[in-house]
Amino acid sequence: MNKEYDVCIIGSGAGGGPVALTLAKAGYSVLVLEKGPWFTEKDFYKDELACCRRSVYTPELSDEQHVIEDVDSDGQWVGEPTSESGWDFWNGNIVGGSSNLMSGFFYRLKPEDFRLLSEFGPIKGANVVDWPISYDDMEPYYTLVETEVGVSGRFTDHPLAEPRSSKDFPYPATLEHPVSKRFDQACEGLGLYSLPTPRAILSGRKDNRRSCEYSGYCGSYGCSSGAKGSSRAALLDQAVATGKCEIKPLCKVYKLSSDNSGKVVSADYYDVKEKKQSVNAKLFVIACQAIESSRLLLSSPGPKHPNGLANNSGQVGKNLLFSAGGAGSGDFDYSTMASQESKEMKRRGPFVNRGLQDWYFIDDPALGGRVKGGTVDFLLRHPNAMSKAMNAKWDDENDLVWGRALQNQLKSIFTDNQTLRYEIFCDWLPTDDCFVSLDDTVKDKWGSPVAKVRIGYHEHDLKIGRYINEHSMKVLSKMGATNVRSSISGAPPANLVAGGCRFGHDPQTSVLNADCRAHDVENLYVTDGSFMPTGGSVPYTWTIYANAFRVAERIKEALG
Amino acid sequence: MTNTMVISRREFMTRLGLLGSLALTYPAAALAELRQSSKGIPLPDWIEEPVWKTIAQVQETLFPAAEDIPGAADIGAAIYLHKAIENPYADGEDRDYIFRGIGWMDELTQQRYTKNYIQLTENEKEKIIEETVQSKAGRKWVSLMLTYILEALLAEPVYGGNPDGIGWAWLEHQPGYPTPAADKTWDQLRQRRS
């Protein structure tokens, strides 16, 4: 006989973990269904093949993929399966989701991000709205994440600092790279506020999790010390320890079945042996990351939901968000440094931990008055050796380089300089040209239609990105970097995705209510980044964690 | 970047004959030691198969050894490639393409020199590669060969290349830790997806 759980959560990443932990601690029976395998600290090594060059944490594209719709040279939208393009949109399909693989740059949104429309007014062609909640509603949960997930940092008061209910971070900042000092000096010279970047990485022990061990390989890698605040290490392990939470890995939910009243009655899935199974629960939570959450809803029509669950207003999948902006970098040549300095610059392990928010709001006539800007985060070039080496294979004329020339090129790339990079995070304005639907022809290995993602961007995003980029390049130059180069584009970063099930007060224009419950399904919540109607100008993870903790409280109330 | 034409100081000095025994510290000394110690290690039988003999020699042309530069044989490029493409989770297309390319090479060398690749002089071998990369398909094949050579150079030694971390040492690259045990290689972990 089938056991009925209080809550069934689909997806175990940053959106699922807080709900699982909160409800399990409150004594409710929780089942988490996760499509991927369950790796632990004992499975994570600094192995570039496993992390980044083979499909270990994500599916083979021939088994599961997306169709990406982009504009061709004739201005037509054309879909291309990712198995053909190689443009992988998966981000860590394992227990704990992509939070296992994040770099853990943790920024809060600012109060203005919750009311973008009333603060900055409408932008033609963009579906900008205010959120149905305010920063004050979210603040306690940002703080909760600092202690529960473990955020390290050093609070510095500055004009754009978000209001905080606690004085400082619960963990001191992680160790910092010598280049950070150079950065601080350059910012001082330019009159900028060098901000220490908070990180979801422990600088000391927390329960069973060890401190960061400063191997220097963090983003894209699973953490073997448990220091990284993944949903798995920080939350799910605790949830399981309560005895109330069960995690079933390798279980792929393909449909939520609903009854004549419109309520969800079961999650239907393929188990580890690819056998069809079904599980009942009082309440269901979707947290599969934005694209897949929309896909699951669209794949789940029922008697009251002919166009897909929670989609009676046709809003599911709409207003998908990525993160706009781009990246730049500059080199610091060892040959120009004294030996001690070059030794310090070569250091691997400590973090740069610096960001700039001087252009989070921009008041410049060149941009037509006060507009929303973004964040710039600084980091060392990723240490992955193979990806670095692969760059040496081609010269400027796109000719292959081999033999002694290749070896010389490699030697130069690896030993001539240190590279400091920056990443710009701007609002990806929600538009009618960025959304998720189901593809008509391409199916996954289980026979379900894959998600088709239209990836249109708003020109305004590029304008803002370029503005911030001009200033960011000056920081690198001031630091003494050479070969400063950058790129701002409208290409979506697949690892920074949100929206698709925006929350709001009006069921006609939003999928979820302010509690992230589906307007027209009384026992269905969505707790990943899908709820965000606008994205803010920071990486999403902290806000996803905080909101999921917030919604977990609402679910607790709903369960009674 | 225009560094392809820049020769390193070390190579410059080597060419001038300035690197005598005093300079044999690192990595030349380490390389010499590696070359010495690997002499006694028995090689697998397949390495004697004509196709693998050709592969190994092509790899050496693409990544030649010098006194202070590890070549394809030093970094175990053939051993790595064999393990990589015979792996149950390997990309079958890569495997097919590599063998197909070796067939083209054989044809081309027969046409040009009426000899097998392994019988050619270094100069002739380079000429064959130069000709191969002129075509789109040939370029794709050489690029694929280089991909696996660079992986062999820099992958964890558990995968069969980069013995004693010689590739890392040569490029002064600091690997991460912990490094994978034999039962935690990517294919072992990949197995747990299915």
Image: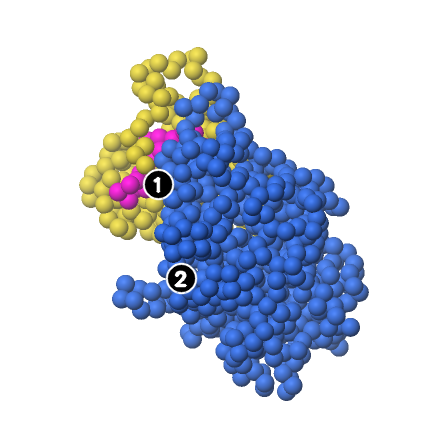
Q: Which residue is mark 2?
A: A457
Residue A460 visible at all = yes
Q: Which residue is mark 1?
A: A393
Q: Residue at x 53, y 84 (%)?
A: A306
Question: Which tint is chain B?
Answer: yellow
Whether residue B122 is situated above or below residue A430 in the rendered picture: above
Q: CA distance from mark 1 to mark 2?
A: 32 Å
Question: Which tint is chain A?
Answer: blue
Q: Which residues are magenta?
A: A394-418
**How crowded is the residue under tag 2: few (<14 C-alpha within 10 Å), some, or many (20+)?**
many
* Nearer the camera: disc 1 or disc 2: 2
User: In the picture, residue A273 is in which quadrant?
Assistant: bottom right
Chain letter for mark 1: A
Give the farthest residue toward the left: B112
Q: Residue at x 68, y 62 (%)?
A: A550
User: In the picture, residue B177 is in which quadrant?
Assistant: top right
